[in-house]
Amino acid sequence: MQATTATTPQFCEGIQHFGTAWEGFSTHAKAAVIKEGKAAIQDATAPDAVYQTLLMADALRYLTLQTCGSKGSGHPGGFASSAEAYASLVMLGHTNIVTEVGHHAPGFYSAMFLDTSLEEMGIKTVTDLMARFREKHGLLGHLSGAIPGLLAPAGPLGQGQHFAMAGALLHPGKLFPVTIGDGGMGEPYVLNSMMHFNTAYPKVTNFLPTLIWNGYSQEHHSMVSRFTNSEMIAYWKGHGFKEVVLVNAKDFDDSKQVGEYVDSSHFSLKQRLAFAGAVLAGMDRAAKSALGGTLTVFIIKQLKGTGVHTVGAKSHNLYPADTLDAPHIASGLKRRALPPEAWAIVRENFKRAGGGPAVKTAVTEHVLDLAPLGKMPLHDFPKTEKAVPATAMGALVAYVGTQDKRYIVTNADGNEASAMKNINDALKIRHPTVDPLYNQEPEGQVYEPLNEDACAGLTAALSLFGSRSIWLSYESFAINGWPIVQTVAQAMAELRRKTPSVVSMFTAGALEQGRNGWTHQRPEIENYFAAQMRNGNTYPLFPCDANAIQAAFDYATNSFNKCMVIIASKSPLPVYMSISEAQKAMEDGAATIYESKGGSKGTIVFGVTGDMIFLPVFEAKDKLEADGFRVRIVAIVNPRRLYRATDISWDTVSEPDNKFMDDAHFNALFDGDVMLAVSGGPSAVLEPVLLRTRAAKRDTFAWKRGETTASPAEIMAFNGLTGEAMANRAKVLIG
């Protein structure tokens, strides 16, 4: 092995092993094949381009393994089997790459290091790269869109395709490859979501799924490892893919490996180059096909762990014993070691690919221009009326969609079923079949796959990539799509740029769904939202009426880098606040909507989240007033504002918000002889009030479990949420 010399590039400081130049280096690597001022190679079949693509693939493998080995931690094996495909994309100038596989993180970090993007965070040498890997304020173990040059986070499987589709929709003419592991093929909806998207947006084909078919998942063979090549091709074609480009390493094997999945690093150099050339040419064909209007997938088939310390599922993860001085790790590095002049060529190609380092050129490194919305056309319902909160908000959703033609509304269970047909009337359901009866048009702005994951995925991805969107769902089904919203909410907390908040609205809460039974009565997800409040950028909003929901939607739509969750009913309900009162309550966190004129036996305070739940609360008020008590009813519309500043990680997030209700205003709302915290869902959203109230006598009324009932009143009674029960408990507490 060579030692470093005066000509060794400075960024190579920390590389433990240098190798000798490959045969043909002086012929095929005299200069970077991506010429100065160019963004890609000129000819995908040129020998120099193929040679330097393989150099790049091995450079990525080497850095991936050494970076993981430096911490005895991380995941080198999966990315290693993708290296030729990733290098080919870079050499072809397609650098807006996302992934479904968080375990490929060290490979993506290696790429961002080689193109100099990581210099934005002070990582200039391999020593820096190793020091910052899997450390606080460094390179977290799975991808984050906050890392310079990287477009999107990757953690839970089955999410990456949403980011690629959002990028393709927002940026016609650019290719958005997404690497997908065959282990992740078992996750729900990966191909299904792309199939539905292609049906709704048949002209948007500029995303390129790139399947890394290596035969293994994390700890065992992948469930698609037994597919034949023809079966795998049929699987993708059965999901609408017209062009399937598959390159199988086994077709180039001259090392007599046994099995369907082989390690191309053991081929002769001639056959390694032949395989790399086939991948490069195949990727070029696939990219042109996708950009040319054909739904296309590229598949690279080679053994997991190709070219690193071991293969198969055993290559997936390093453990504390897998250090850089361990013989098997050192041996793996030495096999991939390149000379300093090869590192220089690889870096030059990386720096030029795509028009420059990803930190300067990736679409998510720039704020996307937003259409001006003007002033929301809020309708001030009088307090003498009843109005449907969902319908009131629907009118504003329709308005935003008419002002912003990029705005997309997603819904799996149907807007009409949630009393928001006015959205469909104005924006139309996107469907290739024109049908006025169902508001269907090919250019509609309402995206309706019967799949919450696909709805949440596209909504969250569009927001992360800089565009407005909203996900509408039944609260009971939201959990099926929530994980990607949580992922994106966390990513938004870390972003170095401003982007519209992820906005969702969940209707048909548990109290409205008596006849449907417990399958539609799952408000427990509100506890999930409540837990996320402490993250610093998540806001569950509980508008109490049709005016408050308009204030909530306006507040959420005009916010940035946050996760806004609106929870409301689709039934006609009393109006308690004017628009201006609701706007102030949304900013403050809560407001009094009723207070008794008299009452001498003591003060009972109700702190309430929800809307329909106010019906039994007001019944309790009547009973208590009749018995001589003073009653104050407080609508808690934005509970995040009611925490103390020390409860929330508000100062650790992008677009920080440090507005919290002070003690004087809080006490003015919630002081009383008895405080009853009431929710139509679970109790966790009431935590900030229960933490701060000075009332020594307090209790909660909240959801317990579902049941089939004939009416909302009956399901509330089943859960003990009746006016009589509340009034009786208040009287017992006050003594």
Image: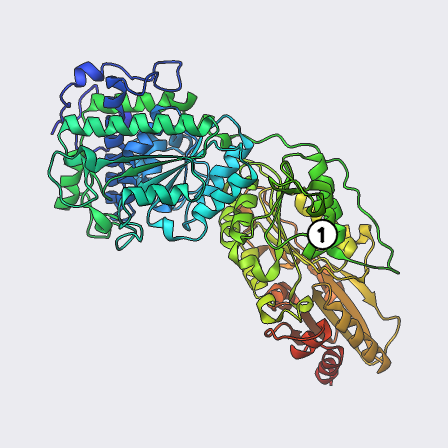
The reply, left or right, for residue 343 in relation to residue 670 is left
Query: How busy is the neighbourhood of tag 1: few (under 14 within 10 Å), some, or many (20 plus)?
Result: many
Q: Is residue 694 visible?
A: no
* Residue closer to the observer: 322 or 151: 151
Which residue shows up at 32% across the image and 45% down it? 231
Locate residue 727, reporting x and y percent: 75, 80
Quarter occupied by the N terminus: top left
Locate residue 427, reporting x and y percent: 69, 41
Q: Which residue is mark 1?
A: 420
Quarter occupied by the C terminus: bottom right
Give the image quarter of residue 382. bottom right
Q: Is residue 708 visible?
A: yes
The reply, left or right, for residue 226 in relation to residue 521 is left
Which residue shows up at 72% across the image and 55% down it? 419
Q: Is residue 116 above or below residue 507?
A: above
Give the image quarter of residue 64. top left
Locate residue 213, reporting x and y percent: 30, 43
Give the image quarter of residue 685. bottom right
* Residue closer to the observer: 68 or 411: 411
Q: Is residue 139 above or below residue 7?
A: below
Q: Is residue 693 above or below residue 116?
A: below
User: Which kind of residue does numbered mark 1 sit on?
Assistant: Met
